[in-house]
Amino acid sequence: MEEQAAPVARNRKVVLREYISRAPREDDMVLVDGGTVALRVPEGAAPVVLVKNLYLSCDPYMRGRMRDFQGSYIPPFNPGSVIEGFGVARVVDSTHPGFSAGDIVSGMTCWEEYSLINKPDQLSKIQRSDIPLSYHLGLLGMPGFTAYAGFYGICSPKKGEFVFVSAASGAVGQIVGQLAKLHGCYVVGSAGTNQKVELLKDKFGFDAAFNYKEETDLTAALKRYFPEGIDIYFENVGGQMLDAVLLNMRTHGRIAVCGMVSQHGLTDPVGIHNLFCLVPKRIRMQGFLQSDYLHMFPQFLGDMAKHYRDGKIVYVEDMSIGLENAPAAFVGLFSGKNVGKQVVCVSQE
Amino acid sequence: MEEQAAPVARNRKVVLREYISRAPREDDMVLVDGGTVALRVPEGAAPVVLVKNLYLSCDPYMRGRMRDFQGSYIPPFNPGSVIEGFGVARVVDSTHPGFSAGDIVSGMTCWEEYSLINKPDQLSKIQRSDIPLSYHLGLLGMPGFTAYAGFYGICSPKKGEFVFVSAASGAVGQIVGQLAKLHGCYVVGSAGTNQKVELLKDKFGFDAAFNYKEETDLTAALKRYFPEGIDIYFENVGGQMLDAVLLNMRTHGRIAVCGMVSQHGLTDPVGIHNLFCLVPKRIRMQGFLQSDYLHMFPQFLGDMAKHYRDGKIVYVEDMSIGLENAPAAFVGLFSGKNVGKQVVCVSQE
């Protein structure tokens, strides 16, 4: 039997140049021509799925994978190899019975035009609907679920409580704030530009918001916004903001530690000074990963899709167009350049 | 009817000179002659109890009451007035129906020879037994209950887990370590002298112990004692030890923050740098006060008295003799001079 030659396509990739320990720069990543890729999965191969990547997610946790450190919950990238991350993709060919050409999937993929997914079980099929496909990287994806799991799983929220969210217009923060409002809390957010502050108040319905870069005294600023103190702090930034929050927490307050994007880990010269507040105020401070709460994922999907369709939750994303712009989009996360959830559109179909 | 003149006694007191914000010094407190005290409660007075103080407790939390800060869970002392603290005392006279002359009580009293207790409802009567009276300030008192409430209420201990206790020979630490051993945990303690380290191993039955002052690298030291990492840290000291612990915690670890005796609060120049560990390791770090767990107190008393009588828990106290030595005894807490629970014997009967 004569085999027809499989159609092929060029496949550009974004590759990590080498491990870094500082904040990432654009030239730590390089766009390379990966040659051609056959657009058909070889017969008899183990169950694999070939996808065309449509949308890629830029997430702060990925910075941890750029370090040469094996001890974390997720292994580091390989220098010289393509970067991995969450994405939404269209199935081109598949030897896995659960997927067929034309399906839209989300899951771990690579920063390239076409990816051969060797562990297709981690992919989820997406039903096309009125919800934009890229929202499966945010509102209905890992960041949205991080907000959901952290708020309901860690914060123990009660109606009427005072909630503070830092990096509040980001992929996670905007959802936390809106969930807290729906829960009957009083919600204040901080962000790094006046444009984001307006977004928080006008678009996401926060009760108040402020630009932390315009405050010379964060402790006093929080005192102004929370004269009775903070019950729940959803921590995305660390550093000076955390110190100021500790002084403004109420008795039996909760701090859900989602990330500390301002922190440089071991190389950070400034420490946290106000942990002594934990004892007299009986504060619970708890780090978490969304992956520990996957039993809540189906409920999350249902709740969020309903909130979105009911107009009770909105979502803002910052879309960069073209794989070649992925490095700049990613680096922008760490200086707050993005307005809303940062995604990269590789292709629209 | 002719009234008989009440007998009187001299009454010396220890008075706080003025508010301080640094570590306390001996001369921040002064022993004064408080004149004479009538050893009978005036007829018709509101329910009050006159006691002769036998044992006084020196506790680190009292340092917080020497600051001019109203916002804490307990108000500051009044400069020029006698210092308050937990004590064991003998009732001399009483107009409260619950107490009569000769009763032994524990509760909040003052650093003086005789005290008129205006709120006798906070006193507890002690049945004389084979347990030394002064142990009601430690093993069966606030420090013992702090250990009990913190270990069972915050640490969520499981058999076989790895437990680290700092300031481990102190009033609270020695109980935490022994409770953890009884629970089937592997327990290591740190202390500041070799004498205390021996005590931890030989007297309290810790699996291992080390002198933190002899370690140049606390992170490496903890790695040595916990090659598989720490599940539970009972935090008494803060500072560099906390930073080293964070790097050595296991996934889903718990840190019960009981106190941070090394921390100088706002004046501390060195901060905590390793809080970024909270997220990937999903660490819960929680401050607590024993007073939130008073519902557990009766069970605590029963458990501890039984453990003590069964020889399963021992207790070591450091007894200073004479009210005049109370300031030095208290100040010694902050340089680790005490070996075991620091108490002051004012009088044996």
Image (tube, coloured by chain):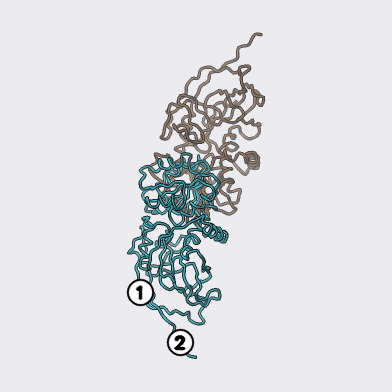
Chain colours: A brown, B cyan
Nearer the observer, B76 or A307? B76
Is label 1 on the same chain as label 2? Answer: yes
Look at mark 1 in the image and give the residue it sits on: B33
Q: Disc 1 or 2, which lies upstream in sequence?
A: 2
- Please say whether residue A348 is visible from this viewpoint: yes
Q: Residue furthest left?
A: B27
Q: Residues within 10 Å of mark 1 (few under 14, many from 20)?
A: few
- For label 2, the SS is loop
The residue marked by circle 1 belongs to what chain? B
- Position of B3 relative to A17 (above/below): below
**Between marks 1 and 2 in the image, the one whose residue lies nearer the viewer:** 2
Residue type at the position of mark 2: Gln
Gap in angstroms between the C-alphas marked 1 and 2: 26 Å
Look at mark 2 in the image and give the residue it sits on: B4
The residue marked by circle 2 belongs to what chain? B
- Please say whether residue A247 is visible from this viewpoint: no
